[in-house]
Amino acid sequence: MRNKKVLLMTEIAIFAALGFVLDFISFRMPQGGSVSLVMIPIVLIAFRRGAGAGILTGILVGLLQIVSGFISVTPLSFGFVVMQVLLDYILAYGVVGIAGVMRAKYMQHAQAKQTGKMITAIVVGVLIASVLRYLVHVITGILFFGMFAEGNVIIYSVIYNATYMIPVFLLAAFVCAALFAAAPKLVDAEA
C-alpha cells in the first residue's frame, strides 16, 4: 500500500515537472497566456490516475510557475496580485486535471479495442479541461486585465483568451489522442 502511494506521488511530481518544462516551449501572448504543451502531462496523469491526481499535478505546475517567477501579473495592489496569481495559475492549471473524469470511458473503450471511441473520450476530456481553464482565464481577464481592453472588457477577455486557448485545446487534443491511441499502456497505471 505504501509503495503505491509513493509511486503515485512520484508520478505526480514527474508529470508536474514535465508540464513546467514543456511550458517553456511556447508562443507567449502580450498580456499573458501562451500556446504551449503544458496541458499534455496534466491530461496524461489525469487519464492515468484519475481527476484527483490530475488536479494535484495541475496545481503543482501552477506553483512551479509562481516560485520560478514565470508568471504575468498586473501592476495592482498586493492583494489583487495574490488573487490573480491564485486564479490564473493554481486554479487554471488545477482544473485541467478534471479531464480525468473521462478516464473510465477511455479505459472501457481501450479494453474493447475501440480506437475511435478512445480518441473521442480523450478529446472530450481535453475539451472539458480546456473550457474550464478558459473560463478561469476569462474571469481573471475581466477582473485584472481590464486596463488593456478597448471597449467592453468582457468581450475583450473572451476574445483575447480564445486566441490562445483554442490553439492550446487543438494542440493538446491532437497530441494526447495520438499519444494515447498509439500507446494505451501509458494510461494503464496497473501495467
Image: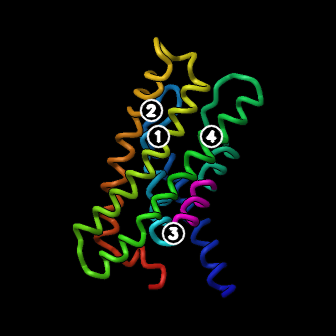
The residue located at (36%, 40%) in the rendering is: 166
The residue located at (66%, 50%) in the rendering is: 63
Rendered image quadrant of residue 88: top right
- Sort mark 2 into few (<14), some (14-19) or many (20+) by Cα contacts within 10 Å: many
In the picture of the structure, the residue carrying the numbered disc 1 is 134
Give left or right: position of 72 versus 99. Answer: right
Residue 161: which numbered mark, if any? 2
In the picture of the structure, the residue carrying the numbered disc 3 is 50
Distance (Cα) linking label 3 and label 1:
21 Å
SS label for mark 4? helix
Residue 147 magenta-highlighted: no
The residue located at (45%, 68%) in the rendering is: 47
- Sort mark 3 into few (<14), some (14-19) or many (20+) by Cα contacts within 10 Å: many
Distance (Cα) linking label 2 and label 4:
14 Å
- Sort mark 1 into few (<14), some (14-19) or many (20+) by Cα contacts within 10 Å: many
The residue located at (67%, 44%) in the rendering is: 66
SS label for mark 2? helix
In the picture of the structure, the residue carrying the numbered disc 4 is 87
Residue type highlighted by circle 2: Asn
Distance (Cα) linking label 3 and label 2:
27 Å
Give left or right: position of 132 versus 14. Answer: left
Looking at the image, do the residues carrying marks 1 and 2 touch, with CB atoms under 8 Å apart? yes
Residue stretch rendered in magenta on the structure: 51-59
Distance (Cα) linking label 3 and label 4:
22 Å
Residue type highlighted by circle 1: Tyr
Please provide percent x and percent y for residue 140.
Answer: 58, 32
